[in-house]
Image (cartoon, helix red, strand yellow):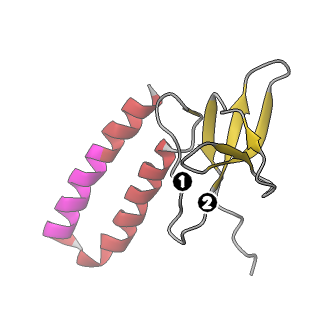
C-alpha cells in the first residue's frame, strides 16, 4: 500500500514538475528535483524482503555499503551487515560470513553538521 501511494505521489510530482518548469518558474527546478529525489528515496526507507531484491554490492565510491539486516528468528535481531554480491558479511569489517537476513534496509543519511 505504501509503495502504491509513493508511486502515485511520484507520478503527480512528475506532472507538476513538468508544468512548472515549462510554464512558470525555471528557478524552481532544483527544488522540484530535490522533492522528487526525496519521494523516490522514501521507497527504500522500508524493510525490503531479501526475496524481493538485494542491496547494491557497491556504492558510488566503489565501497561495499552497510545495510541493516533483520532476522525474525527468536530472538528477533537487527544487525549491521554487508551484501558483497556473493553473500552476506558481518558489517564490522571482520569478513565473517553471516546468514542472509529475511529483510534489509539502507542506513539513513548521517546527521547533518550543526552550525
Question: Per the image, is 73 magenta?
Answer: no
| x and y, in percent, of residue 80 in the image | 75, 47
Report the magenta residues as a range: 11-22
In percent of the image, x 78 and y 58: which residue is there? 93
In percent of the image, x 53 and y 46: which residue is there? 55
* Location of the C terminus (image quadrant): bottom right
Kindly report the secondary structure that dominates the magenta region of the rendered protein: helix
Question: Per the image, is 12 magenta?
Answer: yes
Quadrant housing residue 37: bottom left
Q: Is residue 16 left or right of residue 55?
A: left
Tell me, yes or no, whether the two marked residues, 2 and 1, touch with CB atoms within 8 Å. yes
Mark 1 residue crowding within 10 angstroms, few (<14) / some (14–19) / many (20+): some
**How many numbered discs sit on the rendered protein?**
2
Viewer-proximal residue among 109 and 54: 54
Q: Is residue 108 left or right of residue 41?
A: right
Secondary structure under badge 2?
loop
| x and y, in percent, of residue 61 in the image | 54, 72
Mark 2 residue crowding within 10 angstroms, few (<14) / some (14–19) / many (20+): some
Q: Is residue 60 left or right of residue 109?
A: left
Viewer-proximal residue among 22 and 82: 82
Quadrant housing residue 72: top right
In percent of the image, x 27 and y 44: which residue is there? 11
Separation of disc 2 and disc 1 at Cα? 6 Å
Question: Which of the numbered marks, if any, corresponds to residue 57?
Answer: 1
Name of the residue lying farthest toward the bottom:
115
Amino acid at each position: 500500500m505504501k509503495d502504491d501511494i509513493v508511486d502515485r505521489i511520484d507520478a503527480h510530482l512528475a506532472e507538476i514538475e513538468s508544468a512548472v518548469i515549462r510554464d512558470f518558474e525555471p528557478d524552481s527546478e532544483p527544488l522540484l528535483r530535490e522533492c522528487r529525489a526525496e519521494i523516490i528515496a522514501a521507497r527504500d526507507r522500508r524493510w525490503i524482503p531479501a526475496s524481493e531484491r538485494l542491496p547494491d554490492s557497491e556504492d558510488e565510491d566503489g565501497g561495499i555499503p552497510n545495510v541493516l539486516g533483520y532476522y525474525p528468528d527468536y530472538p528477533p535481531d537487527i544487525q549491521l551487515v554487508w551484501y558483497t554480491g556473493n553473500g552476506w558479511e558481518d558489517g564490522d569489517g571482520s569478513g565473517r560470513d553471516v546468514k542472509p537476513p529475511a529483510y534489509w534496509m539502507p542506513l539513513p543519511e548521517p546527521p547533518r553538521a550543526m552550525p
